[in-house]
Image: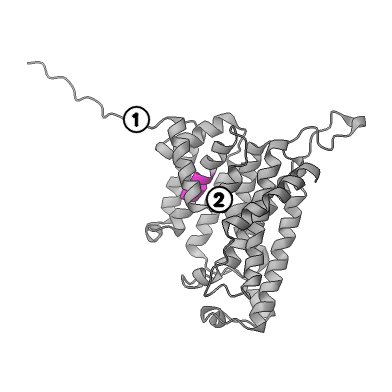
Amino acid sequence: MLQLPDSPPRMKKLVSPDESYQLCRQITAKYAKTFYLGTLLMSQAKRPAIWAIYAWCRRTDELVDGPAAAMTTPETLDEWEQQLETLFAGQPVDDIDVALVDTLQRFPIDIQPFRDMIAGQRMDLYRSRYETFDELYLYCYRVAGTVGLMSTAVMGIDTEQNRSPWNYHQQPYIPTEEAIALGIASQLTNILRDVGEDSRRGRVYIPLEDMARFNYTEQDLFRGVVDDRWRELMRFQIARTRHFYRQAEKGISYLSPDARLPVWAALMHYSKILERIESNGYDVFSQRAYVPQWRKMLSLPVAWLRSQVL
């Protein structure tokens, strides 16, 4: 009896792009409530793409900060970067990848910010302290400034904005630095909000030179000491963070008109975390700075006005 060769293994059938986008939406809604609210203000064409980008970023972050982070090695990140190359070649590996591959086909997104984000996760594998702000800035760019670059490609640029009538053919301004600044501001906000949580994991993201400037020690931080030294240190950190928010604001008017409201809303909502830290007396050890949903909603009319006139 003729024996037929074994059939090749079947490849897993992946979900449709629409189903994949819904998976990404669920991830965004679960883990980034403030960010997710901003995405709901986007156009139907752009909103799912931002969910797809966020889902990839979240999964990347989970490699070093998630439940299985202890199993992550440099080789794990090497494999993740190889999978990234596969996605940019148009080949999704799993169901969540399907949405990102579809997004990459729809929008002119560059691979380098994705690579840079993985490099940021590598830093978390071997660093738990940052001596200077320049060192911290590089980390913040890699893990968050890159998100601004990824998102700008989806948001789009207003090609008519600030185009001189006497030089109509000049290239439109692309707010790259401003997009990075928004990511930096958001990450610095995360760092200040999560000081207590990070300290319990042995991590100190506030630059050590800043702590020394205010005579505040790591031992003080691990004990959750809130005194005049800490309050002055936090005022300094918050002022620096607000500088990056102000820089980011200058770039919003260059975005496509349908992208300005969601970016203004996200910026305003996230910056309000700093206000909550202040109103909590700078105690980020025993309470988490939280902006209630009703307060976010109250800021939407202001965000809309700014999107129209600024």
Q: How is the image coloured?
A: one colour
User: Where does the image place residue 192, in percent across and percent down from the top left?
Assistant: 60, 67
Chain-order first, disc 1 or disc 2: 1
Q: Nearer the viewer, residue 47 or 276?
A: 276
Query: Label 1 crowding class (10 Å Cα cut-off): few <14, some 14-19, many 20+?
Result: few
User: What residue is drawn where x is 46% and y is 47%?
Assistant: 27
Per the rendered image, the range of residues in magenta is 54-59
Q: Nearer the viewer, residue 244 or 39?
A: 39
User: What residue is drawn where x is 63% and y is 76%?
Assistant: 281
Instruction: Judge left or right: residue 96 versus residue 36.
Output: left
User: Where does the image place residue 256, in percent across and percent down from the top left?
Assistant: 72, 36
Q: Say which element carries label 2.
A: helix
User: What residue is drawn where x is 41% and y is 59%?
Assistant: 69
Instruction: Judge left or right: residue 243 versus residue 22.
Output: right
The amino acid at mark 2 is: Met
Residue positioned most to the left: 1
Instruction: Tell me the residue that label 1 is attached to.
Output: 13
Q: Can residue 183 be seen from the camera position used here? A: no
Is 217 within the magenta?
Answer: no
User: What residue is drawn where x is 62% and y is 33%?
Assistant: 108
Position of residue 109 relative to residue 142, above or below, is: above
Instruction: Tell me the residue that label 2 is attached to.
Output: 117
The image quarter containing residue 173 is top right
Position of residue 6 relative to residue 71, above or below, is: above
Instruction: Judge left or right: residue 152 versus residue 286.
Output: right
Is 56 within the magenta?
Answer: yes
Q: Which quadrant, please, contains the N terminus?
A: top left
